[in-house]
Image (spheres, helix red, strand yellow):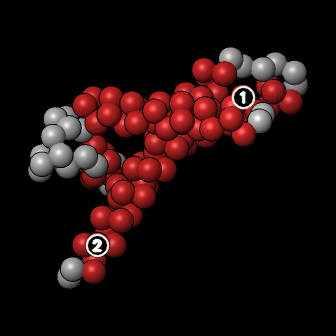
């Protein structure tokens, strides 16, 4: 892939990532997307962690695991000559990336909270 095509690909993925984060915020966090909102974007992981008696980060990783396992299967199929459509790869890999962004947000919030105590 030449540099121009790679940059186009990167830009498309960034746009896709932003749309996922926006869509999931509305769906799972009941966030109104107003930058001044006091609603907690990470509430689903905090409440899910409480429900399963884990910390929010562990809960998030448990949700991310299904996507990692799905990519593992896609990789196995790829090695065996069965190539899944690009859209499936993008969905699974970008979901993993989305969880990483959210995990970093949880970690950042935890560090900032401990720094202020």
- Residue at the disc numbered 1: 74
- Residue at the disc numbered 2: 112
Q: Can you see residue 104?
A: yes
Q: How far from the left and from the top, in percent, is residue 70?
A: 63, 31
Q: Looking at the rendered structure, which numbered label has been put on residue 84? A: none
Q: Earlier in the sequence, mark 1 or mark 2?
A: 1
Q: Residue at x 25, y 72 (%)?
A: 113
Q: How many marks?
A: 2
Q: How far from the left and from the top, in percent, is residue 18?
A: 40, 36
Q: Where, quadrant-wise, is the C terminus in this rendering?
A: bottom left
Of helix, strand and loop, which one carries label 2?
helix
Q: Quadrant of residue 68?
A: top right
Q: Where, quadrant-wise, is the N terminus in this rendering?
A: top right
- Decide which of 5, 91 is in the foreground and name it: 5
- Decide which of 8, 98 is in the foreground and name it: 8
Q: Is residue 93 above or below residue 48?
A: above
Which residue reaches farthest right? 80
Q: Residue at x 35, y 58 (%)?
A: 106
Q: Residue at x 36, y 57 (%)?
A: 105
Q: How far from the left and from the top, in percent, is residue 94?
A: 54, 36
Q: Is residue 117 above or below residue 104?
A: below
Front position among marks 1 and 2: 2
- Decide which of 75, 4 is in the foreground and name it: 4
Q: Is residue 61 left or right of residue 7?
A: left
Q: How far from the left and from the top, in percent, is residue 27?
A: 27, 29
Of helix, strand and loop, which one carries label 1?
helix
């Amino acid at each position: 892939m030449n540099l121009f095509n790679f940059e186009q690909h990167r830009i498309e993925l960034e746009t896709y990532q932003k749309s996922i984060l926006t869509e999931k915020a509305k769906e799972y966090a009941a966030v109104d997307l107003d930058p001044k909102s006091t609603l907690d974007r990470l509430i689903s992981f905090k409440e899910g962690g409480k429900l399963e008696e884990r910390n929010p980060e562990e809960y998030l990783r448990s949700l991310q695991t299904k996507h990692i396992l799905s990519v593992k299967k896609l990789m196995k199929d790829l090695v065996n000559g069965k190539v899944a459509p690009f859209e499936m790869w993008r969905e699974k890999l970008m979901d993993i990336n989305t969880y990483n962004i959210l995990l970093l947000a949880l970690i950042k919030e935890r560090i900032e909270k401990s720094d202020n105590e």
